[in-house]
């Protein structure tokens, strides 16, 4: 596992910085409207659950946008596996929503799924604390989510196609997840790019028979985050451009 490292905000195009700032406003608005009723993005998804079960997907059946083919769910690992976090959101894109020309990576053990839209790609996970505040982003090895493996460059191309544009199960949470993916786009790009380097290095150093199914390699890259710090950095960079 490796940290994606710091982002040089001054090197980002002004148009991207402006999109990030707008996304930051929507993230804060989502937090505000939920907070007005004492809720947060995690609690909003768990409200109908009498008991919170580790490993279960929340909401049941995931959140899926049939127009964009974006998908996400929230879940938590056992307490001894989640120091500092309550759980995390996993985000995905399915093939019908991917940019033209993208195909699964040519890995040795690739097996095509039965359904034409089942070869989904994991994008990034968003880890949250007990208060529902995001604390870090991370990427994972293939076995963690059962995804189909795509080259990092292709996964990066998918990022701008992720959008959940409907009200169920929570409009505020859907807006939050969608715009978190924009606000932290530079970090997510860097992490995905580093992901493949980490996997290749692990395979070389550990003689893995199948590195993508190696249970010893779970989290491939991670990055601590702060919404307030990110917005402040974007505003500072915009003043310089």
Image (cartoon, helix red, strand yellow):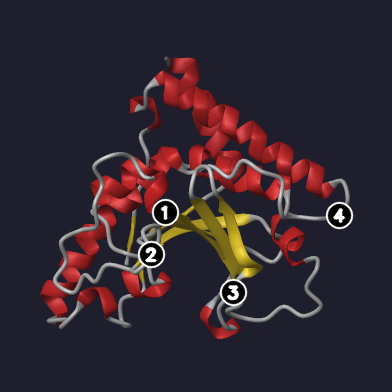
Sequence order check: which comes first, mark 2 or mark 1? 1
Labels 3, 1: front one: 1
Q: Residues within 10 Å of mark 1 (few under 14, many from 20)?
A: many
Separation of marks 4 and 2 at Cα, in angstroms: 41 Å
Labels 2, 1: front one: 2
- Looking at the picture, tell me which residue is in the foreground, 139 or 230: 139
Q: Residues within 10 Å of mark 3 (few under 14, many from 20)?
A: many
User: Is residue 20 shown left or right of residue 150?
Assistant: right
Q: Is residue 85 visible?
A: no
Q: Residues within 10 Å of mark 2 (few under 14, many from 20)?
A: few
Tag 3 and tag 2, C-beta contact below 8 Å: no
Separation of marks 2 and 1 at Cα, in angstroms: 11 Å
Tag 3 and tag 1, C-beta contact below 8 Å: no
Sequence order check: which comes first, mark 4 or mark 3? 4
Separation of marks 4 and 1 at Cα, in angstroms: 34 Å
Residue highlighted by disc 4? 38
Residue highlighted by disc 2? 115
Tag 4 and tag 2, C-beta contact below 8 Å: no
Q: Residue at x 39, y 72 (%)?
A: 146
Residue 126 tag number? none
Sequence order check: which comes first, mark 4 or mark 1? 4
Residue highlighted by disc 3? 76
Residue 22 horizontal/vertical position (percent) = 59, 27
Sequence order check: which comes first, mark 4 or mark 2? 4
Secondary element at image label 2:
loop
Q: Residue at x 19, y 79 (%)?
A: 210
Q: Residue at x 76, y 58 (%)?
A: 44
Residue highlighted by disc 1? 94
- Looking at the picture, tell me which residue is in the foreground, 168 or 220: 168
Secondary element at image label 3:
loop
């Amino acid at each position: 596992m490796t940290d994606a490292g710091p982002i040089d905000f001054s090197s980002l195009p002004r148009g991207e910085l402006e999109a990030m700032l707008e996304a930051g406003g929507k993230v804060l608005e989502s937090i505000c409207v939920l907070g007005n009723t004492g809720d947060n993005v995690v609690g909003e998804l768990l409200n109908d659950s009498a008991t919170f079960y580790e490993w279960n997907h929340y909401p049941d059946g995931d959140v899926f946008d049939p127009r964009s083919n974006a998908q996400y769910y929230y879940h938590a690992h056992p307490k001894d596996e989640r120091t500092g976090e309550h759980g995390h959101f996993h985000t995905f894109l399915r093939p019908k929503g991917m940019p033209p020309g993208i195909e699964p990576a040519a890995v040795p053990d690739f097996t095509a799924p039965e359904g034409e839209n089942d070869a989904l790609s994991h994008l990034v996970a968003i880890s949250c604390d007990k208060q529902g505040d995001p604390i870090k982003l991370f990427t994972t090895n293939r076995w963690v989510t059962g995804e189909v493996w795509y080259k990092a460059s292709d996964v990066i191309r998918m990022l701008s196609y992720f959008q959940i544009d409907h009200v169920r199960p929570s409009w505020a949470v859907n807006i939050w997840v969608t715009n978190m993916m924009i606000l932290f786009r530079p970090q997510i790009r860097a992490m995905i790019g580093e992901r493949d380097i980490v996997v290749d290095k692990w395979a070389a150093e550990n003689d893995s028979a199948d590195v993508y199914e190696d249970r010893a390699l779970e989290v491939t890259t991670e990055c601590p985050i702060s919404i307030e710090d990110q917005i402040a950095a974007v505003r500072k960079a915009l003043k310089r451009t």
